């Protein structure tokens, strides 16, 4: 139960309107808990119904995606786009292609995105989308056909000044390219409608690296603020996709030793430090399983199953695979093994019980909507470059990204302190992200 009856009422209404969507409920509850001191200080937001409105998407689109596989068989998937909040800018957020995708996942991700995008201090609203399509095991031709069919419908709802999607799980450079090509064909316009584009057609340097690098810049700032650092630290990172690979690269550059990575089948442990060139060859070039790693590095071990990765002794953990991958048991193992910092590369990878354990045990904890905001921040920088018809160098983009991540840490930390919750970066990120959107919604009136 939430202590504030008004917030509990908002939460009850969310559950009633969105039955059987536990991930969405979880994301909303966490934000509402953080807003308890805010509603006391700002009764005007209550009377303007800001919180009642912020939990309801401005628009939710669900559509059929039919396509023909290599065997000539017709396949049907479901596509989604949630346009959650446009108070501070065009809707912005990635597309996820994974069999687990349904309305509840899309809404949780879209809701989180509102506050994350606000934290970047860039003019982007919150959105998210995707499909229950499973890219695993599909040929390039099948991926292309699916992406084209998906975009044929999605193109009716997006635009460079309306809604700008990007990648997420299962959507990388290849998929963005196919979708961009289809959008261009349908509209006959070359515009910055998707981000994460290839460098030859409007992509930004450093976008590929941005979420992982940004995660480490944020973590580095959090560590420094508490008298610690990556130097000499043992780091465990889950996942071996876009976020995990570039988090591993930056963590290593900052002096950490990354000893474990995973995929949805299992994890590898290399006590000497993971060889990233091998991982990139396996995952980015050959698109194979992480288990292949031990064929190149026989001193490393591979273990089936995902959650065991949290039993590896480490100083810093960067969960970068998927939602709810660290439960109470895994969190307790991390604490018992002396882990002093956890920062979330994935969206909502820690369950509420896990977060409670981190907080109770004094583990520095950087929540996803702050720690992984570097991806969307750099996407917004890609939008700026597209509007200017200009490109910045890698170093320019990287420097902007670093500044943004440092500011996100500081703003969240200051907001937590201002509301009497010093050190609680979950509340700090929720409050700092909320305030800007709330002010914009308040100024724009009820029927905006
Ligand atoms: P990728 O598809 O590139 O990689 C995902 C990784 O996580 C893969 O190793 C995958 O393993 C693993 N994984 C996916 N689903 C599961 C699951 N159910 N159980 C265990 N492992 C799983 O995605 P990204 O790296 O882009 O995204 C990872 C996380 O980061 C997501 O939560 C995403 O929302 C978040 N994020 C991504 C951003 C970006 O810019 N890409 C920005 C901000 C957040 P397998 O290959 O076996 O499926």
Image (tube, rainbow, N blue to C red):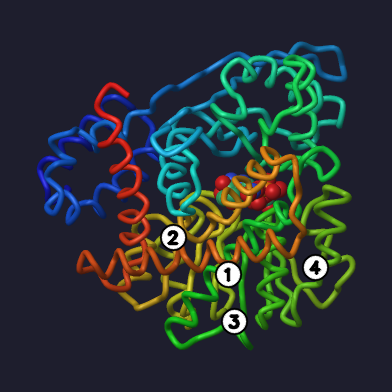
The residue wearing badge 1 is 217
Q: Quarter holding the C terminus?
A: top left
Q: Nearer the viewer, mark 1 or mark 3?
A: 1
Indicate whether 396 appears above or below 39: below
* Label 2 Cα crowd, 10 Å radius (few <14 / some 14-19 / many 20+): many
The secondary structure type at the circle numbered 2 is loop
* Residue 352 or residue 377, whichever sits in front: 377
Q: Whole-percent x and y of residue 288?
A: 83, 50
The residue wearing badge 4 is 276
Q: Nearer the viewer, mark 2 or mark 4?
A: 2
* Label 3 Cα crowd, 10 Å radius (few <14 / some 14-19 / many 20+): many
Left/right of residue 433 with respect to residue 126 in the rendered view: left
Cβ–Cβ under 8 Å for marks 1 and 3: no
Indicate whether 117 appears above or below 19: below
The residue wearing badge 2 is 367
* Label 1 Cα crowd, 10 Å radius (few <14 / some 14-19 / many 20+): many
Looking at the image, which residue is at 61% across and 34% down?
A: 165
Task: Pick whichever of labels 4 and 3 is earlier in the sequence.
Answer: 3
């Amino acid at each position: 139960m939430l202590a504030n009856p008004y917030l509990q009422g908002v939460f009850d209404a969310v559950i009633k309107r969105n039955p059987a969507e536990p991930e969405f409920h979880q994301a909303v509850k966490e934000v509402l808990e953080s807003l308890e001191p805010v509603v006391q200080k700002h009764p005007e937001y209550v009377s303007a119904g800001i919180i009642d409105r912020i939990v309801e998407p401005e628009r939710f689109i669900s559509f059929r995606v039919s396509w023909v596989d290599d065997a000539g068989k017709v396949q049907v998937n479901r596509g989604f786009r949630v346009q959650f909040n446009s108070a501070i800018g065009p809707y912005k957020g990635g597309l996820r292609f994974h069999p687990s995708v349904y309305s509840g996942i899309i809404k949780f991700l879209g809701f989180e995105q509102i506050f994350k995008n606000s934290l970047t201090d860039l003019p982007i609203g919150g959105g998210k989308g995707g499909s229950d399509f499973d890219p695993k095991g599909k040929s390039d031709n099948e991926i292309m056909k699916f992406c084209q069919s998906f975009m044929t419908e999605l193109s009716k709802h997006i635009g460079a000044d309306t809604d700008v999607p990007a990648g997420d799980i299962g959507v990388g450079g290849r998929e963005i390219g196919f979708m961009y090509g289809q959008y261009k064909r349908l509209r006959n316009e070359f515009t910055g409608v998707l981000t994460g584009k290839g460098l030859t057609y409007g992509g930004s340097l450093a976008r590929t690296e941005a979420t992982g690098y940004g995660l480490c810049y944020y973590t580095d700032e959090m560590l420094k603020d508490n008298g610690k650092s990556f130097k000499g630290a043992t780091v465990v990172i889950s996942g071996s996709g876009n976020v995990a690979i570039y988090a591993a690269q930056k963590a290593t550059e900052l002096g950490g030793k990354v000893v474990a990575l995973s995929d949805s089948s299992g994890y590898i442990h290399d006590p000497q430090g993971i060889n990233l060139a091998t991982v990139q060859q396996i995952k980015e070039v050959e698109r194979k399983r992480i288990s292949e790693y031990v064929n190149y590095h026989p001193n490393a071990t591979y273990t089936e199953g995902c959650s065991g990765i949290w039993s590896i002794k480490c100083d810093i953990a960067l969960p970068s695979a998927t939602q709810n991958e660290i439960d109470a048991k895994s969190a307790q193992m991390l604490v018992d093994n002396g882990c002093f910092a956890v920062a979330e590369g994935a969206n909502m990878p820690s369950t509420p019980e896990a977060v409670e354990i981190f907080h109770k045990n004094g583990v520095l904890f950087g929540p996803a909507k702050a720690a992984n905001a570097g991806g969307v921040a750099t996407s917004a920088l890609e939008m700026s470059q597209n509007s200017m018809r200009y490109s910045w160098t890698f170093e320019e983009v990287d420097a902007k990204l670093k500044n943004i991540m440092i500011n996100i840490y500081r703003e969240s930390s200051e907001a937590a302190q201002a509301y009497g919750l010093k050190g609680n970066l979950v509340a700090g990120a929720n409050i700092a992200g909320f305030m800007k959107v709330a002010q914009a919604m308040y100024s724009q009136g009820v029927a905006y």
